C-alpha cells in the first residue's frame, strides 16, 4: 500500500517552521505497511492545495494531510478539498458539537469565526478532535470512472493535535481496526531499527558491513551520519509483523557481529545514557577535567536524569594557570609539552581523580580553532586522558585530529572521551 504525506502551510514552504509532521507520519505509516510514495508541501493557497489533491489521489491508497484547518482566512484546506471534490461545504452538526464542546470546556464563548471549522464538503466525514478546536476530515475518494480510489485524511497542523488524532482515529482506520495489524490488501509491514556507532568513519563502517549493505537485501541496511555518529538504519519489509521481527533480529545480530562493541546503542538511546548505565551498573563514579570543551563533557554526562549517582563534580580549567592552581598540573610540563599534550591531560586527569575521589577521571585539552593551530598541532588536535583508580597501568592517553569547525571539534572531543570511558568500563581496549 502506498501513502502520500501532504503538509500545508506558508510557514513550512517559507522554511520558518521545519515540517516535523511529515517525518513522524512517515514512520507511523511505515509501521502499518504503507510505503510513503512522496512527501509534498504546499503553501496556504487554495489552488495549490486543490492541485496537490488532484495530483496525489491517483498515486496512492491513502493521502494523509496536515494543516490549514484553522478558523482564519489563511486556513484553506477544507475549501480546497471541496473544490477538488466539486461538492459544497455544509455545516456538519457533529463537527459543530465538537468545536462547541472545546469552547465549553474552556468556559469561553465560541467565536462566530470558528463555525467554519464545522463545515465539511458534502459526503465527507468528521474526524473527532479531542485536543483542539479543528475537527479533522475523512473522505473515501472514488473517481467518476471508478478507477481511482484513495482514502483522504486531513488533520490539524499543530503537531500535538495531529498526533493524537492520528493515534485515535487515523491509524485504526488504516490498519483495519486493530493496532499493529497490516492494512487490507497491504503489501506487508515495515519495521525499522537504528544501531549507533562512534569513532569510525562512514566508509570504514560500510566496509565492515560488506554484503549486509547490498541494495537488494531485505531487511536493508544503510548508513547515515549525524552529529559525529555513524548509524545503521535497518528496514524490514515482510508480510507479517512476526516475520519482520524475526528477520530484523537476525540482521541486527549480523550487524553486531560485524561491528562488535563499536555499536553503542539503538534507536532513541544516547551515548551519555549508555555510559551512565555502565557506570551505575559498576557502582563507579567519574569526574571531568576540561579545557577546550569548556564543560561540554560534564554537560553531556549530566544531561542524563539520575546522573548524580555517578557524577559529583568536574573542572573547567581553560587557562594554564588554572590547570596548575586547580588540578596541580606542573608548570614545567605545561612549558615543555604545551597545554595540548598527552602529558598535560594525564596530569589533569590525575589531579581531578585525586581531588574528587571518583573512580575514574577524563581530561580533554585541544585546539578547537579557528585559530591557534600550528603545523605540529593543527586545528582539531585534541588530547584525551582517562585515569582510573583500579587501573594499575595508570590510565591511557590518546591524541586525535577531529575535522570540522570549533563546535564540531568540541563535540567530537567530548563524545570520544565518553567512548574511552565506555570501553574502559567494558574492560576492552579502544578498537581504533
Ligand atoms: P489548525 O491546526 O487549526 O487546523 P493549522 O493546522 O494550519 O490550523 P497553524 O496555525 O497554521 O494551524 O499551525 C499551528 C502550529 O502548528 C504552528 O506553530 C505551525 O508552525 C505548526 N505546524 C503546522 N504544520 C506543521 C508541520 N507539518 N510540522 C511541524 N509543525 C507544524
Ligand atoms: Mg496553517
Image (spheres, rainbow, N blue to C red):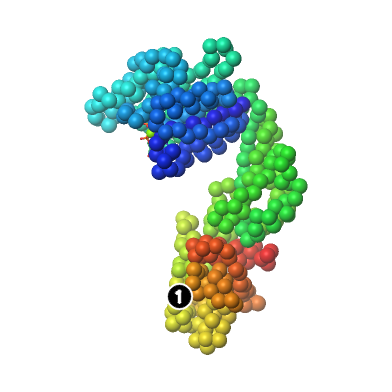
Q: Estimate how packed mark 1 is, as few (under 14), some (14 to 19) or many (20 or more) residues with alpha carbons within 10 Å.
A: many
Q: Which quadrant contains ligand 2?
A: top left
Q: How many marks?
A: 1
Q: Position of residue 290 (x, y in %)?
A: 49, 71
Element under disc 1: loop
Q: Nearer the viewer, residue 154 or 354?
A: 154
The quadrant of the image that shows the N terminus is top right
Instruction: Judge whether 312 appears above or below 328 on screen.
Output: above
Q: Ligand 1: does it lie within 8 Å of the C-beta at label 1?
A: no
Q: Position of residue 137 (x, y in %)?
A: 43, 23
Residue drawn at (32%, 22%) of the image: 116
The quadrant of the image that shows the C terminus is bottom right
- Asked whether the viewer can see residue 250, the reply is no
Q: Position of residue 325 (x, y in %)?
A: 44, 82
- Asked whether the viewer can see residue 295, the reply is yes
Q: Nearer the viewer, residue 142 or 293?
A: 142
Instruction: Judge whether 205 appears above or below 62 on screen.
Output: below
Residue drawn at (50%, 22%) of the image: 54
Q: Quadrant of residue 220?
A: top right
Residue drawn at (63%, 61%) of the image: 199
Q: Residue furthest right?
A: 211
Q: Is residue 300 left or right of residue 241?
A: left
Residue drawn at (59%, 14%) of the image: 147
Q: Is residue 252 left or right of residue 121?
A: right
Q: Position of residue 369 (x, y in %)?
A: 50, 69
Query: Which residue carries the number 1 mark?
Result: 317
Amino acid at each position: 500500500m502506498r501513502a502520500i504525506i501532504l503538509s500545508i502551510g506558508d510557514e513550512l514552504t517559507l522554511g520558518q517552521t521545519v515540517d516535523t509532521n511529515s517525518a513522524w507520519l512517515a514512520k507511523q505509516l511505515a509501521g502499518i505497511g504503507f510505503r510513503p510514495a512522496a512527501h509534498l508541501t504546499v503553501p496556504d493557497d487554495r489552488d495549490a492545495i486543490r492541485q496537490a489533491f488532484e495530483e496525489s489521489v491517483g498515486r496512492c491508497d491513502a493521502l494523509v494531510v496536515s494543516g490549514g484547518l484553522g478558523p482564519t482566512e489563511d486556513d484553506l484546506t477544507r475549501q480546497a478539498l471541496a473544490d477538488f471534490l466539486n461538492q459544497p461545504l455544509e455545516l456538519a452538526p457533529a463537527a459543530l458539537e465538537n468545536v462547541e464542546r472545546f469552547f465549553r470546556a474552556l468556559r469561553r464563548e465560541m467565536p462566530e469565526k470558528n463555525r467554519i471549522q464545522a463545515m465539511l464538503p458534502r459526503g465527507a466525514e468528521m474526524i473527532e478532535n479531542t485536543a483542539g478546536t479543528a475537527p479533522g476530515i475523512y473522505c473515501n475518494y472514488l473517481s467518476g470512472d471508478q478507477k481511482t480510489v484513495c482514502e483522504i485524511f486531513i488533520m490539524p497542523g499543530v503537531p500535538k493535535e495531529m498526533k493524537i488524532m492520528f493515534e485515535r482515529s487515523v491509524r485504526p482506520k488504516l490498519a483495519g481496526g486493530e493496532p499493529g495489524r497490516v492494512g487490507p490488501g497491504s503489501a506487508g509491514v515495515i519495521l525499522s531499527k537504528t544501531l549507533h556507532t562512534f569513532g569510525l568513519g562512514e566508509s570504514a563502517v560500510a566496509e565492515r558491513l560488506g554484503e549486509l549493505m547490498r541494495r537488494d537485501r531485505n531487511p536493508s541496511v544503510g548508513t547515515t551520519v549525524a552529529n559525529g555518529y555513524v548509524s545503521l538504519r535497518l528496514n524490514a519489509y515482510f508480510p507479517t509483523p512476526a516475520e519482520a521481527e524475526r528477520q530484523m533480529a537476525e540482521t541486527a545480530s549480523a550487524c553486531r557481529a560485524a561491528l562488535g562493541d563499536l555499536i553503542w546503542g539503538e534507536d532513541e538511546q544516547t551515548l551519555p545514557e549508555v555510559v551512565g548505565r555502565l557506570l551505575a551498573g559498576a557502582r563507579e563514579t567519574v569526574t571531568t577535567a576540561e579545557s577546550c570543551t569548556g564543560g561540554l563533557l560534564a554537560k553531556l554526562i549530566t544531561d542524563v536524569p539520575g546522573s548524580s549517582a555517578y557524577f559529583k563534580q568536574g573542572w573547567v580549567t581553560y587557562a594554564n594557570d588554572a590547570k596548575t592552581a586547580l588540578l596541580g598540573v606542573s608548570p614545567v610540563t605545561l612549558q615543555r609539552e604545551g597545554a595540548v599534550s598527552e602529558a598535560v591531560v594525564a596530569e589533569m586527569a590525575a589531579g581531578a581523580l585525586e581531588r574528587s575521589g571518583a573512580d575514574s577521571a577524563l581530561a580533554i585539552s585541544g585546539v578547537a580553532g579557528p585559530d591557534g593551530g600550528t603545523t605540529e598541532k593543527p586545528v582539531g588536535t585534541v588530547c584525551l586522558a582517562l585515569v582510573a583508580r583500579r587501573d594499575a597501568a595508570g590510565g591511557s592517553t590518546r591524541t586525535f585530529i577531529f575535522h570540522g569547525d570549533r563546535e564540531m571539534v568540541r563535540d567530537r572531543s567530548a563524545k570520544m572521551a565518553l567512548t574511552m570511558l565506555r570501553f574502559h568500563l567494558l574492560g576492552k581496549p579502544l578498537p581504533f
